[in-house]
Amino acid sequence: MPNWLTFFVDTIEAINAPLAVVLKASGCREGWLQGELYRAGREYDLRVNECALGHRQTADLSCGEKPDMFAEIKIVGANYYPKMRGYIEADVERMRAASAPGTERFMILIMPRCDAKTALGEYLKSCSFSTKCVERGWPNFRMRIWQL
């Protein structure tokens, strides 16, 4: 199995230019990123939307039968609907509650650049879900990945 944190960071680094374009395509951003991560992780049997995390909910990404790893992706900017904070936190709590011993869990947050000064924007800058976090920035977006 790969070092998943490194895999996610390196893959998003490699696709940052096309991702910056797709961030403007409302309604398909997360699905596109899932597909790109799937393409990069096929050799590790990375799966998309297969691992159950509760009633009628699945993890965006998973690997292994127990599973060995699962991850959630959120793409959100400061000017997005304020309920997003609740959605992000609910995903993190669902992942924490659903994991088996030894399961690696990741929250991948992509934030398009935004000049809006909002409560959600401040939250996105300061939220933290674990001490293990990798942050990267590009001209059109920022990325934060927590290993939970």
Image (tube, rainbow, N blue to C red):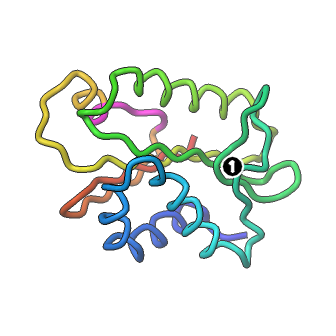
Front in this rendered view, residue 23 or 126: 23
Q: Position of residue 146 (x, y in %)?
A: 48, 45
Position of residue 53 measured from the top left corner of the image (x, y, whole percent): 75, 34
Q: Quarter holding the C terminus?
A: top right
- Quadrant where the N terminus sits is bottom right
Q: Identify whether 134 is placed above or below 77.
A: below
Residue topped by disc 1:
70
Is residue 38 in the magenta section?
no
Look at 78% across and 50% down and name the residue there. Answer: 50
Stretch of the chain drawn in magenta: 124-130
Give coordinates of residue 37: x percent, y percent. 57, 66
Kindly indicate the quadrant of the structure image that contains residue 120: top left
Q: What residue type is labelled 1?
A: Phe
Q: Quadrant of residue 23?
A: bottom left
Question: Based on the displayed image, in which of its 4 quarters is residue 72 positioned?
Answer: top right
Locate residue 88 relative to residue 69 in the image: left or right. Answer: left
